[in-house]
Image (cartoon, rainbow, N blue to C red):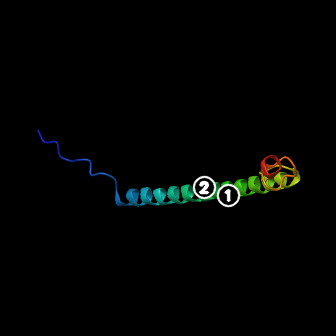
Amino acid sequence: MCFGGGGGGPSPAEQEAAADQRIEAEAAKSEEIQKRAKQKREDISTALESRTRRSGMRGGAGRRSLFKAGGGGFLGRFG
């Protein structure tokens, strides 16, 4: 009743081929991650640019000062 490792396992050539495949798979995965990161950066830049363009076209959007608003501001009410 011997349960030894009689199969011998994969040959050195098979081990080397498997290692090469792992290296290639990791390189492909890394390249895909870099592509996605670049695309995300471009998308974010595009979104920010369009947002700043739109906010520049709106007249009156944003905060208005209570002190500069003529008549309806803080000084006009309580001054």
| Total number of numbered discs in the rendering | 2
Residue 7 position in % (x across, y down): 26, 47
Residue 79 position in % (x across, y down): 79, 52
In the rendered structure, are the residues bearing label 1 and label 2 in contact, judged by CB atoms less than 8 Å apart?
A: no
Q: 77 or 64: which is nearer to us?
A: 77
On the image, numbered disc 1 is attached to which residue? 41
Residue pictured at 74% horizontal, 55% vertical: 48
- Number of other residues with Cα within 10 Å of mark 1, as a class: few under 14, some 14 to 19, many 20 or more: few
Which of the two discs, 1 and 2, sits closer to the camera? 1
Position of 19 compared to 35: left or right?
Answer: left
Considering only order in the chain, which callout, 2 or 1, is on the residue closer to the N terminus?
A: 2
Q: State which quadrant residue 17 falls in.
A: bottom left
Residue kind at label 1, given as amino acid type: Arg
Position of 13 compared to 67: left or right?
Answer: left
Residue 36 position in % (x across, y down): 63, 54
- SS under mark 2: helix
Q: 54 or 46: which is nearer to us?
A: 54
Q: State which quadrant residue 40 falls in.
A: bottom right
Asked if residue 63 is positioned above or below residue 3 in the image, the reply reads: below
Residue 69 position in % (x across, y down): 84, 52
Position of 24 compared to 48: left or right?
Answer: left
Residue pictured at 11% horizontal, 38% vertical: 1
Q: CA distance from mark 1 to mark 2?
A: 14 Å
Q: 62 or 14: which is nearer to us?
A: 62
- Number of other residues with Cα within 10 Å of mark 2, as a class: few under 14, some 14 to 19, many 20 or more: few
Residue pictured at 21% horizontal, 48% vertical: 5
On the image, numbered disc 2 is attached to which residue? 32
- SS under mark 1: helix
Residue kind at label 2, given as amino acid type: Glu
